[in-house]
Amino acid sequence: MATRKKNPSLEQALNDLENLVAQLEQGQLPLEESLKVFEEGIQLCQEARNTLLKAEQRVQILMGKNGDHLQEDFVAHDDPTL
């Protein structure tokens, strides 16, 4: 299993996730290694989801209620449950 950087870009997270899925689909990993790869995949999914939620929030701020650009500051919420 390759070491990956903390908080990768969305594209890197998706690429890493595809690689992990391919490893699991081959069925050649021992059980413990499979569990580690699966756990890493879950973490990547959560990080990607957080990135997408933050992007959605930024778009909503920029568009405003009537599609007008607002001058509101973006506040990132680093909630691990998202």
Image (spheres, rainbow, N blue to C red):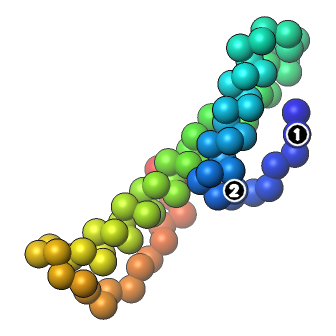
Q: From the viewer's perspective, tell me whether residue 33 is left or right of residue 57.
A: right
Looking at the rendered structure, the secondary structure element under dot 2 is loop
In which quarter of the view is residue 38 placed? top right
The residue where tag 1 is placed is: 2
Q: Is residue 44 above or below residue 68?
A: above
Q: Is residue 59 above or below residue 36?
A: below
The residue shown at (69%, 56%) is 8
Q: Amino acid at mark 2?
A: Pro
For label 2, the residue is 8
User: In the shown orientation, is residue 69 left or right of residue 65?
Assistant: right
Q: Is residue 57 visible?
A: yes
Q: Residue at x 85, y 10 (%)?
A: 28
Lower sequence index among marks 2 and 1: 1
In the rendered view, does 56 fall on the left or right side of 13?
Answer: left
The local secondary structure at tag 1 comes to loop
Q: The disc labelled 1 sits on which kind of residue?
A: Ala
Q: Residue furthest top?
A: 27
Q: What residue sits 79% from the left and 28% below the top?
A: 36
Q: CA distance from mark 2 to mark 1?
A: 14 Å
Image spot of residue 43 (x, y percent): 65, 41
| Classed neighbour count for the residue bearing mark 2: other residues with Cα under 10 Å, few (<14), some (14–19), many (≥20) | some
Q: Which mark is residue 51?
A: none
In the image, residue 62 lies at what x, y percent? Answer: 30, 77
Quadrant where the N terminus lies? top right
Q: Is residue 38 visible?
A: no
- Circle 1 residues within 10 Å: few <14, some 14–19, many ≥20: few
Q: Residue at x 41, y 79 (%)?
A: 74
Q: Is residue 36 above or below residue 34?
A: below
Q: Up-down: is 29 above or below 47?
A: above
Q: Position of residue 71 (x, y in %)?
A: 30, 90
Residue 59: % across, % down: 34, 69
